Image (tube, rainbow, N blue to C red):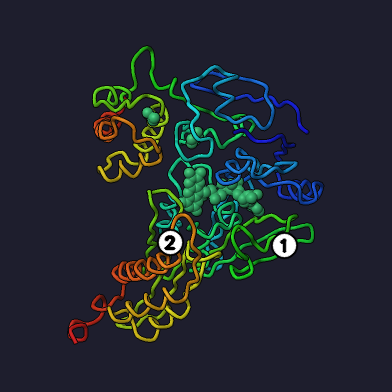
Amino acid sequence: MTDGVTVRLTVNGAAREGRCEPRKLLVDFLREDLGLTGTHVGCEHGICGACTIMLNGEAARSCIMLAVQADGAEIMTVEGLAQDGQLHPLQEAFREHHGLQCGFCTPGMLMTALDFLRVHPDPTEAEIREGISAVLCRCTGYQGIINAVKAAAPVLRRPR
Amino acid sequence: MKPPRFDYHAPTSVDEALSLLGRYGGDAKLLAGGQSLMPLLNFRLSRPAALIDLNRIPALAYMKEADGQVRFGAMTRQRAVEFSPVVQARLPLLQEATRWVGHLPIRTRGTIGGSIAHADPSAEYPAVLVALEGEVVVRGPGGERTLRPQQLFRTYLTTGLEADEILTEVRLPAMPAGAGYAFEEFARRHGDFAIVGIAAMVVVEGRHCRKARLATAGAGPVPVRLRAAEEILEKDGVGDAAIDAAAQSAGELVEPDSDIHASADYRRHLTRVLTARALRRAVVRAAGRPGAGVPASEASL
Ligand SMILES: Cc1cc2nc3c(=O)[nH]c(=O)nc-3n(C[C@H](O)[C@H](O)[C@H](O)COP(=O)(O)OP(=O)(O)OC[C@H]3O[C@@H](n4cnc5c(N)ncnc54)[C@H](O)[C@@H]3O)c2cc1C
Ligand code: FES
Ligand code: FES
């Protein structure tokens, strides 16, 4: 059996490194080895979306990917959204429109919405609902999330 | 839960992957997008001695046109398929079907080869492969062979691949210019596996249907080609009555099982309803549909 592997990657712009077993899930590596606990673990089989991160610029589930597979990759977690103490426009919109839910699935919602708005810069409400259905949770502020994504779209379209 | 322990290998060529497969003699699993395999490992429903990760083999990710076909390296991501201009132009049915495969963050990792090798009868890509009469290329220790869908899909999650073989390429004939198409699906939530899905393509000339292609997802242990329904359209055209007759026949051709998601009867019913819906949408899309491209005097007859 393979014992330890070294994983080197870039997370939220910083070079990071750790050693783990090959069977270690990326989500657990981020949380336990790198101390980035913003990415949450829900179902561990790709359904709920709580563990969604950006992998080389695209949203992906970190619970059905091995940490060793991320060697050399560029990752962004929810901790990477705010810059210089300024909330990301998507975070602002979630706050403004009461899209925060109880909070557990919110990081996954944000990362999903970030990628969704990149490929659908000017979405209809129906498209937003379909896009956000990638995250299972419907607790508390669901309509708020739809409103927040809609409100964030024009802000993200502006060159920043 | 977490995966059991395994040896992990990340070969950089197909030859290397093949020799690793041989070394473990059937006790290794190929890891493609991991979107089906990793959940099985997390729940310890699968306990292979080794994982052979195909993600570091650049030669397995490509799309190219050749001999009237579009050829996809097995490791081409579903998301790349979805946004490909070549797929949009040559295989719009595949593009439409892709939007039903899980969700965007699943398609980021999921691959076309993994979906077909996994052979879930509810999956969209196997139905498209059947409808468009594609084939797959498989490599093993003894060389390469191509498999047609009938040779590939055996039953639930079971293919004609040997344990020491790798699916390397998926080939789909480019759709004829002006072909109408539609992928219709019923799932309980967008992104869930299909309860039933229908892939349809029609080539229409005036009032005639030169070619009809229909295949199901979710209506049996393998995707089903609905040949008798196609023949009704090719004989009687694509008017309302012919479409209804084809849909009726589709419901009779499938032999679905009952499970916790739906009864066999309900799946039959969905097969009829979705076939009719897919055909109507495909016919509207088909260039050369009755009325379009036919002289006005003739079209009004
Ligand atoms: C929440 C969720 C929803 C989903 N919904 C859908 C859906 O609606 N429709 C749908 O079709 N799919 C769905 N999927 C599954 C997804 O499309 C997978 O991508 C697909 O089933 C398997 O492809 P993969 O590349 O991830 O393969 P993997 O999971 O890596 O592999 C699957 C199986 O195929 C074998 N394999 C992989 N590649 C090869 C190869 N080249 N040669 C030989 N064997 C190989 C593996 O060993 C394994 O046994 C969903 C997945 C999730 C997590
Ligand atoms: S924890 Fe990853 S999708 Fe649920
Ligand atoms: S945010 Fe998902 S459970 Fe509350």
The quadrant of the rendering that contains the N terminus of chain A is top right
- Residue in the picture at 33% in, 41% down: A120
At x 51%, y 27%, the residue is A75
Mark 2, Cα crowd under 10 Å, few <14 / some 14-19 / many 20+, is many
Side of B172 where B279 appears, left or right: left
Q: Quadrant of the C terminus of chain A?
A: top left
Q: Nearer the viewer, residue B269 or B115?
A: B269
The image shows residue B107 at horizontal and vertical percentages of: 48, 45
For label 1, the SS is strand
Mark 2 — residue? B196
Task: State which mark lies toward you, 2 or 1.
Answer: 2
| Quarter, ligand 3 | top left
Q: Is residue B76 visible?
A: no
**Is residue B122 among what the camera can see?**
yes
Cβ at disc 1 under 8 Å from ligand 1 = no
Give the camera-side residue of A53 and A104: A104
Side (left or right) of B297 relative to B194: left
Q: Could you tell me which secondary element the residue under label 2 belongs to?
A: strand
Q: Earlier in the sequence, mark 2 or mark 1?
A: 1
Using residue A50 as the reference point, say whether residue A31 is left or right of it: right
Q: Is residue B299 above or below residue A103?
A: below
| Residue type indicated by callout 1 | Glu
**Residue at 61% across / 69% down in the picture?**
B148
The residue marked by circle 1 belongs to what chain?
A: B
* Residue on which the image places disc 1: B144
| Amino acid, disc 2 | Val
Question: Residue B203 location in percent, x, y?
Answer: 38, 75
